[in-house]
Amino acid sequence: MAIATEEISRKISDLQSKSAEEVLKWAFDAFGSGIALASSFQCEESVLIDMMHKTRGSDFRVFTLDTGRMNEETYEVMERMREKYRISIESQFPEREAVEKLEKEKGLFSFRQSIENRKECCGIRKVVPLNRVLSTLDAWITGLRKEQSVTRTDTPKIELDVPRKGMVKVNPLIDWSSDRVWDYIKKNQVPYNKLHDQGYPSIGCAPCTRAVQKGEDIRAGRWWWENPEQKECGLHTHQK
């Protein structure tokens, strides 16, 4: 690791009051090329890419988990971000054999039949590819925000990624509101996923995401057949 675990533990509280830009600066100073942004190309990651570009030019890593079931609008914003910021985007794909086996044995929509089946699909398409790329890093940056889910309300700006021993997770926007995210996008003319204009506050795989209705929770369109407390795919867990 580029920085001792004991120092990370101290920084968890020290950085809670710092701005997103200050958290990012600390993260890059601490981990250098051993840190990367995990992007699903929602509005939060658009903000983070713009912030990082302002201070680091194109000298930062961005990776995405291409599950094979993403919306066209997601690919479109990926391309706009690549062109505007002159960055490389590392697409991480699931293992072909695992996807073929899943679809052959359980069909194309097994994830709607049970939570276990849904987590199996998320595991193959997202968790395994994520762990593969994280094995090459010391830390990763996310676009998590507390407002997004009841499962994220206690998430700090810096945390030890408990399931992945030795890994540090950086959440610079965790205390940002949705209004603040959109104010930043508009002020800085940042490219964003056009699905947000179609009623999608949260965007995942196409078959597992729908637009939300007025008054619904912002994560209501993700795995809408499940209870809110269960709406995580296995990518994000944190220490209580």
Image (tube, rainbow, N blue to C red):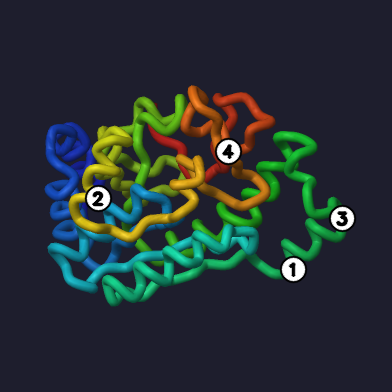
Residue 1, visible in the rendered structure: no
Disc 3 to disc 1, C-alpha distance:
12 Å
Q: Which residue is mark 4?
A: 222
Which secondary structure, mark 3?
Answer: helix
Residue at 35% across, 36% down: 145
| Quarter holding residue 86 | bottom left
Disc 1 to disc 4, C-alpha distance:
26 Å
Residue at 50% across, 66% down: 75
Which label is found at residue 105? 3
Who comes first in sequence, dot 3 or dot 1? Answer: 1
x then y, percent, for residue 144: 37, 41
Is 135 in front, or is 80? Answer: 80
Who comes first in sequence, dot 1 or dot 4? Answer: 1
Disc 1 to disc 2, C-alpha distance:
43 Å
Amino acid bearing label 4: Arg
Amino acid bearing label 3: Glu
Residue at 26% across, 68% down: 60
Which label is found at residue 97? 1
Disc 3 to disc 4, C-alpha distance:
24 Å
Who comes first in sequence, dot 2 or dot 3? Answer: 3
x then y, percent, for residue 20: 19, 45
